[in-house]
Image (cartoon, rainbow, N blue to C red):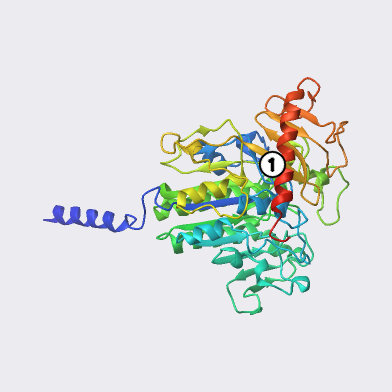
Amino acid sequence: MKTLLATLLIVSSTFVAAPLHARPALDHPNIIIIFVDDSGYADYSHTGSPTIHTPNITKMTHEGLNFPQFYCASPACTASRYGLLTGRNPARSGLGKWVIGPTDAKYIHPNEVTIAEGLKNQGYVTGMFGKWHLGSPNSNNSFTADSLPLAHGFDVFEGTTVSHDYDNSMLIKGPSTVNDPTTGYESIESDVDSNVTIMRGLTKRYTERAVDFINTHKASPFFLYVAPNMPHLPVYASENFQGKSLRGPLGDCLEEIDASVGQIRDAIDAAGITDNTLIIYSSDNGPWIKYAHTANHAEYGEARLHVGSALPFRDGKGSTWEGGVRVPGIFCWPGTIPPMSREKTPASTMDILPTVFALAGESLPTGRTLDGRDIRPFFNPSQFTATVPDFTYIYTGNSNNSRYGVRKGAWKIHTKLYSQTGNNYGFTASEASPLLFNVEQDLGERFDVSDANPSEVSNLKAILDAFNASLASEGSFWD
């Protein structure tokens, strides 16, 4: 009798502990995007850093899909975030800038459709924790709440309005009627840049909010967007990570981000929803090497020591050389994406919206051009059998999102050049005489082969001309 009772208790406790809320893997899978700031391609264990230890991010590459050729939408903050959330090239934004400051009148236009808005249509709960940088309420836009995340599909938000190094970078949360009933947000800190304690705790804060969000909404489909402020300068880490990395403050910061990834994945596992949760890890652009070429900066300390690496690519943030736009591209979805998957063809953050909309059963937005593609077949070609269109990428940059070049296949042209370091590495480029590189064989863009490949130059120029014609005919929602 005692043996029978013990058996019943074990069976009963096992049944109670089993997750009752898990859905089939393909039934409105949860989507988590972790989008760090200014992280260099080579700042990770899996891409060769000898001094930054990132076991949790490396584990995602082992258990999921890694894109060694992955692109952000722009080499700068606002434009890149626009491309991620809309699936559109930043030249279509109408913002006129690649970085929006706290007093700029414009913001992501209300007519844009974001990932959060589309998934919300399909019954997803949506949350964002981290850096927004797609608009701020101010006197130039009548303090409109339309400039902030809750107006663009997010049910809950806590984070900074812009980068943490701006004067008047606000840390806010919403929805709330406390402090600012006009915009619906509560102010936590009105000038993050002046509060070191706040800056040191940002990554920890966002991780805690993300885990709480998962635990609260684990029974429902959810979209979670986590956007750490760092390793954008100045870099900080919370107390438990300070002085732990061989790479100094930059390494401390990235190792805390890696631990954050681990905590988020642990929360997913504990909730019993691993098989129906897709986690994506990437960065908004390359490392801010401008400060690796200057003397110490009063605001950033020994900045040259705190800047990441884009090797083997040339240059970094702000540049349309590959180091400015090549970023990690990791997709982890155990049970759907086979472990140790590696896709040799390129993809970009602009592909994420069409892909997750297809997973959720949401139609693509109409009345606009999308520049991303549905890349589900790269996840598992036996399960997702559609043909993925060829990768074509238009490089935009230098303050106003103007066009700098094109990549298709292995070939890339530069029609003009820009680096925040002021160094064009001995090259010149124009629309009449563009540079041509094979960026799969010449990773550092060192050997211009335009003279030997006139047909490739002509083909790429035609793609750029067609893109420019599309912009001219379609305009933007701000026009």
Q: Is residue 272 left or right of residue 389?
A: left
Out of 258 and 163, give the one closest to the viewer: 163
Q: Residue 321, located in which quarter of the rendered image?
A: top right
Q: Residues within 10 Å of mark 1 (few under 14, many from 20)?
A: few
Q: Position of residue 333 (x, y in %)?
A: 46, 44
Rendered position, 359 above or below 342: below
Q: Residue 348, located in which quarter of the rendered image?
A: top right
* Residue annotated with mark 1: 246
Res 310 visible: no
Q: Residue at x 52, y 61 (%)?
A: 126
Rendered position, 382 above or below 99: above
Specify the farthest residue to the top. 452
Res 254 visible: yes
Position of the N terminus by quadrant? bottom left
Q: Position of residue 335 (x, y in %)?
A: 41, 41
Rendered position, 147 above or below 397: below
Amino acid on which disc 1 is placed: Leu
Out of 464 and 425, give the one closest to the viewer: 464
Q: Position of residue 112 (x, y in %)?
A: 62, 59
Q: Position of residue 158 (x, y in %)?
A: 61, 65
Out of 32 and 346, give the one closest to the viewer: 346
Position of the C terminus by quadrant? bottom right
Out of 301 and 374, give the one closest to the viewer: 374
Look at the numbered disc 1 and give the secondary structure of its residue: loop
